[in-house]
Amino acid sequence: MTEDDSVIGIPKRSWKKGQWWPVSLAIARADAGPTIVEEKTEFNVVIEDVPSSLRISVINVVKALTSLALKEAKDLIEGLPKKFKEGVFKDEVEEAKKQLEEARAKIAIV
């Protein structure tokens, strides 16, 4: 190791398994433990687009899936993209997705 490889006696590189590694990499590999990934449980359904010729059928599906009246369902479809349902569980999201896609609405699950 040369003087350029250290700052105040702290090496910039570490000898590990016969190779020189940057110290930050050596530390990261030593500290890497099992990572826990939490599964997302709540989702948002966003209606992105509805063909103009199929708006009536999508409005009827929106009314059936929510407690919205005709005017509110129509207003929801008018200004797309909009969140249709927020913070719902996977089963409810899949059912809404199925019905909206059958009515030819383009949706996204976030």
Image (cartoon, rainbow, N blue to C red):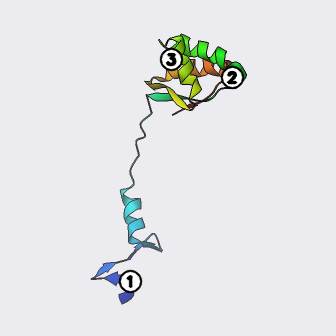
Residue 92 lies left or right of residue 100; in this view the side is left
- The amino acid sitting under disc 3 is Glu
* Percent coordinates x, y for residue 76 in the rendering: 53, 23
Circle on res. 5: 1
Please tell me how crowded label 3 is: few (under 14), some (14-19), or many (20+) other residues with Cα within 10 Å. some
Indicate the secondary structure of the residue bearing disc 3. helix
Can residue 43 be seen in this snapshot? Answer: yes
Res 54 → quadrant: top right
Q: Quadrant of the N terminus?
A: bottom left
**Which circle's residue, 3 or 2, is located before the other in the chain?**
3
**Which circle's residue, 1 or 3, is located before the other in the chain?**
1
Residue found at x 53% / y 15%: 71
Circle on res. 104: 2
Residue 61 lies left or right of residue 90; in this view the side is right
The residue closer to the viewer here, 38 or 79, is: 79
Residue found at x 34% / y 82%: 6
- The amino acid sitting under disc 2 is Arg
Give the residue pinned by disc 3: 72
Circle on res. 15: none
The residue closer to the viewer here, 14 or 8, is: 8
